[in-house]
Amino acid sequence: MSYKRIIISVLLSMIFLFPLYMIFINSFKFELDIINNPAALPDIYTFKNYLNIFSRSDQLFTKSLLNSVLFTSLSIIFVLILSSTLAFSMYFLSNRVQNIIFIFLLLGLILPTPIILIPVFTILKFFKLNNTVVGLVLFFSAYYLPFGTLVFKGFLKNVPKEMIEASFIDGANFYICYYKIVLPVMKPAAASIIIITGTWVWNDFLNPLILLGPLQGTTVTVGLYRMVGQYSVNFGELFAFMVLISLPVIIAYLFLQKYFIEGLMAGSGK
Amino acid sequence: MPGLILFGLLIMLPILLTIVYSFFKISFLTNQFDYVGFKNFLKLLHKKDFYNSLQIVLTLTIIAVIFSNLIGIIFAKLFNKNNKIFIVLRVLIFTPFILSPIVVGYTFSSILTDKGILNQFLNFFSITHDISWLGDSKYALISISIALCWQLVAFCTVIYLACLKNIPSELEDAVNIDGANNIQKFRYLDWPLLAPALTINTVVILISSFKLYDRVLALTGGGPGRSTETISMLIIRTAFNENRVGFASSMSLILLILSGITTFVALIYLGKREVTI
Amino acid sequence: MFLINKLNKIKYLISILVFISIFPFATNAKDQIELDFMVFETPNLPAEFWDDAIARTVAEFPEYKINKIVPPNVGTMGDYLKQLQATDQFPDVMMSNFAVAEFIEAGLLLPYEDSDLVRFVDPVGLGLTNGKQYALPQLTVVESLMFYNKDMFSKAGISGEPETWEQLEDAAAKLKSNNLTPFIVGGAAGDSWAAAWPLMDLVALNVTGKDKDFLKNLKNGSGDFSNPLMEDSINAYSDLVSKGWTNSTALSLNYSELQQTFLNGDGAMYPMGGFFAGAVPLDHPFEIGVFAIPALDGNSRLVTYTSGGPAVSANTEYPEEARKFAVEFATNVATNADDLFRDAHIPNNKNFDLERDMKGYDIHPLIFEIIEILQTPNYQHVPFFTFEVGDDALVSGMQAEVFANSQEILSGKSTSEIIENLNNKLAELQ
C-alpha cells in the first residue's frame, strides 16, 4: 500500500515536473541534440550556451539582471515599509474605517493590471516619473501594498491588544511602539513578503515592458522576450537564459519555502 | 499613512481615470481628447473581437478552476504523508508557480511545437499523429490552458496540503473506527475541511485567468488569427497599437466589473459554504 | 497640517528613490549629439550588422552618440513604435520598415529637404506625402518573388518557370501528384506578417496595382473590401490551402523556422521577399531558383518596395543633425554593400557601384537573379500592399488586421468571413 503510493506519487511528480527537467537539461546541450532528443540526457555536456549569453555584444543578460535586481530590491523595501506601517495604523482605526480600507485593498488585490496601465502611465508622466525605475518601483509598491498589508495584519492578530495598549500607557508613541513591539513580531511576516512580492516583481513582464520602456534597459523577463523575438531562436541559449533568470527565485524559494506558504495562507485567509 | 496615499494615487485614481476615459475618444498619436458619451460602449456591443476574447477568457477560467482544483486535491491527498520522499515532493511540486509566466510560456511552446517532445511522444506510441498544438485554432486554447493549469496546480496543491495538515488526527481516527470507506471519508471529512483552501484557490485562479497575458503572448501571440486573444491582450492592442485609448478603457471597465463581480461572488458564495458545512 | 507633514515625507522618500536610481546613469556629457536610433534585427541582419553600420557613420562623424534601440519583434515594429510614442519614448531616428503612412498622418515624422535626397537614384520610392519624403529611399526590395527548389521541379517534370497563375497552379498540381508539398507558407504568433506575405503580394498585384481607385475609395468611405478583385486575391491564397498544396505546419512556424522548412527541402516553392536570398548559404545542398509571382490577369507586374531607410521624429531635439545622420547612414557605401550581401537589399545610392563595392563579398547568385528581375523592362512596378504612403496609403491601423486575417486564411476561414472581418475593422476605424 505504502510503496504503491510512493511509486504513483513519484511518477506523477516526474510527469508534472518534466518541463523543469527539460529546460535545465537542454540548456547544457548542443542545438542539434536538443531538436533530436529533447528529453534525453546530453551526449556531451556543454557550457557554450551559458558562455554565449554572457558574451552577447549587447550585454542583454547582464544589463537586464542589474536592472531587475535594482528595482526588485527597491520594491521589496518599499512594500515592507509601507504595508507594515499601514497594517499597524489600521489597528487604531474604528472597525468601520478599517472595513472600508479593507474593501479597497481587496479591490486592489484582484485588479488585473492591464486595466489601469494607461492611466498609471499618465499619472507617472504628470510627476515626470514615466519611464524611470522610480516610477516602476512606486507602481509596484502601490500594487503589492494590499497583499503586504493583509499579511502583516494576519500576523499582527497574534499580538495581544493589551501589550500594545500597555506600551502606550508607558508613554511610547506610535513609532516607538511600532519599533519595539510590532517589528519583532513581523519578522516572519516580513520574510514572507520579501520572498513573495520579490518573486512577483521579478517575474512581472507587462508592467516593465510598458512602464519602463527600452531606454532604461530591459528587465530579465523583457530581455527574454526580446531575445526570442529578434533571432532565429537558438533553443540552447533560450533555455540557458530561462535557467539563469529563474535560478534566483528558485534558490530563494528553496531557502525560504516555509515563509512562502505561510505568507500565501496569511495573505489570502484574510 | 503614506502607503494609503500611494495606493490611492497609483491604483484607485487610475481606476477612476479608466472610468472617465471610457467616455472619451483619446489618441496619443494625435493628442485627441473628445467626449463621446456612451459611444465607446455602443461600439463594443458590435465588436466581434471583444465577444471572442470574452469567450476565450471565460473558457480558460472554467477549465482552470475545475482542473487545477481537481488535480491539486489529488496531489495533496497523495503527498499528505510524513515520509522523507513526500516532504521532498511537497517542496518540488510548488516550483512551477514561482516561475515567470513568460518563462512558462516559452517552455511549453518548445514542448508543444510541431516537432516538440509531446508530438514525438504521441507519434512514437501512435496515439495521435502530428497535431499542431499551437498552430491549429482547435488545439491552441487547450495548449494555453495546459500552461496555465500547470502553474495553478502547483499553487492549489500546496494550499490544499497546508489545509490538510490542520485536520486533527483524532478526527481521522474516529472516522476510521466508524468504518467509512475512502469516498465517504473524503466526502464527510476532507471535503468540508478543505473548504477554506477551495476558496483561496478559486479566487487566485479567477484573478490569474482574468489578467492572462504573458503566457499567451509567448505561446501563440493571440493567434492563429485572433483565436486565443485574451481580453488583456485585446486591451493592450487597442490602447497601444491602435491608439484608441478611450475605447480600450471601455473594455477595461467591463473587464473590471466582470472580474470584480466574479471574484466577490466566488468569495461570498464559497465563504458561506465554509460556514455551513 | 497632518497631511502636509505626510506629503513632505513622501517627497522625501521620492527624492531618495530618485537619487538611488539616477546615480548609475548619471554620466552624461552634453557636448555630443545624442540620438535614439531604432533598428530591427532579423536572422539576416543581426546585432553585429547594425553595430558595424552605426560605428561606420559615427567614425566619420564623431559628434554623434547613438543609442541603439531594438523592437522585440521585427513584424510588430510599427506597433512597438506606437507604444513608445504613447509612453513618450519615441526614438529620434528609426529604420522605416513598417507602415509609415499613419505616422506621417499623425505628424510624428519630420519631412526631408530636397537636398537630403540628391544622393538617391530614385528619390521618390514608395511615394511622397504632400510633395515631401518622410523615409529615406535607402534600398529596394523585390517583394513578389517565388523561390523554388530546382530538384523538386525537375522531379515533378516541370520544365520552365511558371509565367502565368495557371502555369503556377499546374506546377503545383504536378508537384502534389509527385507527393511533394508545393508551397511553404506560414508565420505563427508574433510573425503573422510572414503568413500575410502571399496575401500582400496577391493584393498588390491584383487589386491595388490594378485598380488605382481601390485604396482611395477605402479612405474616403465610398468603397470597402467587398470587391471582386479582392475576393479573387483572397481566394487565390485560400485555394492553395484548401487544395492541400501548403505545409500543414504553417501556423506553428515562426519566421526563421519557416525559412528553414524551405531550406530543408520540405516543400517546392516559397513566396517571400528578395531578402530570403541573403539567408541561402553558398554551399546549400540543392539549387534554388527564383521567379516573379504572376498576376492573376496575366499582366506583368512586380511588387517592389523602395524605402526602408531612416525616418526622423518630428519631435527630436536635433532635427538638422538627425536628418544629416540619417542621410549619412543610408548612403554609407560600405553599409549598403553589407546590406546587399546579408539581406539582398538593393542599394538606391548613386555612389554605389555593384562591381567596385562588392569586390570583397562572395555574393549568392540568387541575388544577381533578383537584380535582373528588378531590371526586366516590361514589368509594371506596384507598391507593396499595407506599406503604401501618401494618398495611396491604406487606412491607418488596417495592417495588423491584414496580418491577423492571413493567419485565419491559413487556418481555413472562408473568403467571405475574411472580407467581413476586414470590413468590420474598416468601419470601426472610420
Image (cartoon, coloured by chain):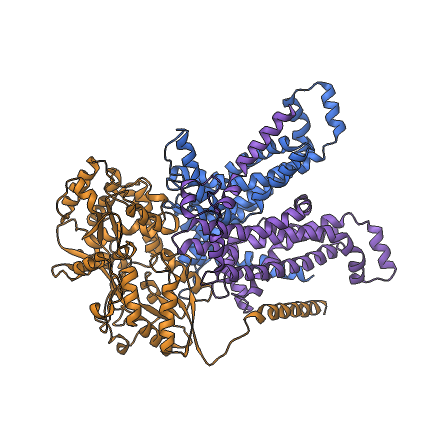
Chain colours: A purple, B blue, C orange
Please determine whether, in this image, residue A155 is positioned above or below residue C80. Answer: above
Please determine whether, in this image, residue B169 is positioned above or below residue C102. Answer: above
Instruction: Examine the rendering and report whether any part of residue B114 can be seen.
Output: yes
Looking at the picture, tell me which residue is in the foreground, B223 or B99.
Answer: B99
Looking at the picture, tell me which residue is in the foreground, C270 or C93.
Answer: C270
Residue B66, located in which quarter of the rendered image?
Answer: top right
Quadrant where the image shows the N terminus of chain A: top right
C95 sits to left or right of B183: left
Q: Give the farthest residue toward the bottom.
A: C31
Spot occupied by residue B5 in the image (x, y as percentages of width and height): 64, 61
Spot occupied by residue A92 in the image (x, y as percentages of width and height): 77, 55
Q: Give the farthest residue toward the right.
A: A170
The residue that appears at 32% across and 43% down in the rendered structure is C250
Q: Give the farthest residue toward the top.
A: B179
Residue B244, located in which quarter of the rendered image?
Answer: bottom left
Spot occupied by residue A257 in the image (x, y as percentages of width and height): 66, 46
A210 sits to left or right of C233: right
Instruction: Examine the rendering and report whether any part of residue C221 can be seen.
Output: no
Spot occupied by residue C85 in the image (x, y as percentages of width and height): 43, 65
Quadrant where the image shows the C terminus of chain A: top right
**Number of marks present in the image shown:** 0
The residue that appears at 48% across and 66% down in the rendered structure is A215
Looking at the picture, tell me which residue is in the foreground, C206 or C369.
Answer: C369
